[in-house]
Image (cartoon, helix red, strand yellow):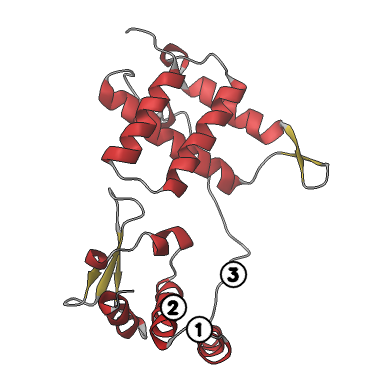
């Protein structure tokens, strides 16, 4: 199989992801950041060099390299969740390389490599009473330019709270993503695997407001 440098291929992959798959800017930055780190470790990496062993070495380097953060503090290693994020971003690119015929197989799907197991012991979430306090504060203490903007913004905040949306998911919502007939919301942050959120308490009234308000 012909050997190709990865850098120009990744540029092509980014164009495909941006214009054909309509991936969000936030996700595109994630793709680029993960690839930049791979290039930092292996500046001249090619398709022929990609292997489970090379990727294992890359993740080991991420865990042992020293980096400067904040006000000159030196840290070593990264969280398992960070490794998982880089793994997911890179495997998208490698799967595209397989699809295009540049690779025979995705090295990150080799049985010799195991996806990092992540356990979140410090999960933080808002209870319903906290969400109601936020909505009450926004409704009663914030000065809005007019009633239309006030109603719209409170509805936006309510949808984010009740559906547990990331800010990028919230900002990517479109009117066609709202299904009032079935009381659900389709989140298109990743067009290939959209989230479908069923109706929850306080969800449908807010969605109806967002679907009908135009500014």
Identify the residue under disc 1. Answer: 144
Quarter of the picture containing the N terminus is: top left
Q: Nearer the viewer, mark 3 or mark 1?
A: 1
Quarter of the picture containing the C terminus is: bottom left
- The answer to whether 68 is drawn above or below residue 176 in the figure is above
- Choose top left, top right, bottom left or bottom right for residue 38: top right
* Distance in Å between CA atoms under marks 2 and 1: 9 Å
- The answer to whether 87 is drawn above or below residue 215 in the figure is above
Element assignment for label 3: loop
Identify the residue under disc 2. Answer: 153
Mark 3 / mark 1, whichever is N-terminal = 3
Name which residue lies at 41% across and 64% down: 170
What crowding class fits label 3: few (fewer than 14 Cα within 10 Å), some (14-19), or many (20 or more)? Answer: few
Q: Nearer the viewer, mark 3 or mark 2?
A: 2
Q: Position of residue 24 (x, y in %)?
A: 39, 49
Identify the residue under disc 3. Answer: 124
Residue at the extreme front of the image, as rendered: 145
């Amino acid at each position: 199989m012909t050997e190709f440098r990865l850098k120009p291929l990744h540029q092509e992959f980014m164009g495909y992801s941006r214009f054909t798959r309509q991936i969000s800017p936030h996700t595109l930055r994630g793709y680029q950041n993960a690839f930049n780190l791979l290039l930092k470790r292996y500046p001249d990496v090619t398709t022929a060099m990609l292997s489970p062993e090379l990727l294992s070495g890359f993740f080991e380097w991420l865990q042992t390299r020293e980096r400067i953060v904040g006000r000159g503090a030196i840290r070593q290693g990264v969280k398992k969740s960070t490794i998982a994020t880089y793994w997911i971003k890179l495997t998208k690119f490698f799967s595209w390389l397989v699809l295009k015929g540049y690779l025979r197989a995705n090295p990150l799907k080799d049985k010799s490599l195991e996806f990092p197991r992540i356990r979140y012991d410090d999960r933080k979430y808002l209870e319903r009473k906290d969400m109601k306090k936020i909505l009450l504060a926004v409704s009663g203490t914030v000065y809005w330019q007019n009633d239309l903007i006030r109603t719209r913004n409170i509805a936006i905040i309510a949808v984010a709270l009740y559906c547990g949306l990331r800010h990028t998911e919230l900002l990517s919502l479109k009117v066609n993503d709202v299904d009032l007939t079935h009381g659900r919301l389709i989140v298109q942050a990743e067009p290939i695997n959209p989230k479908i959120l069923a109706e929850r308490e306080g969800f449908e009234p807010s969605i109806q407001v967002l679907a009908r308000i135009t500014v």
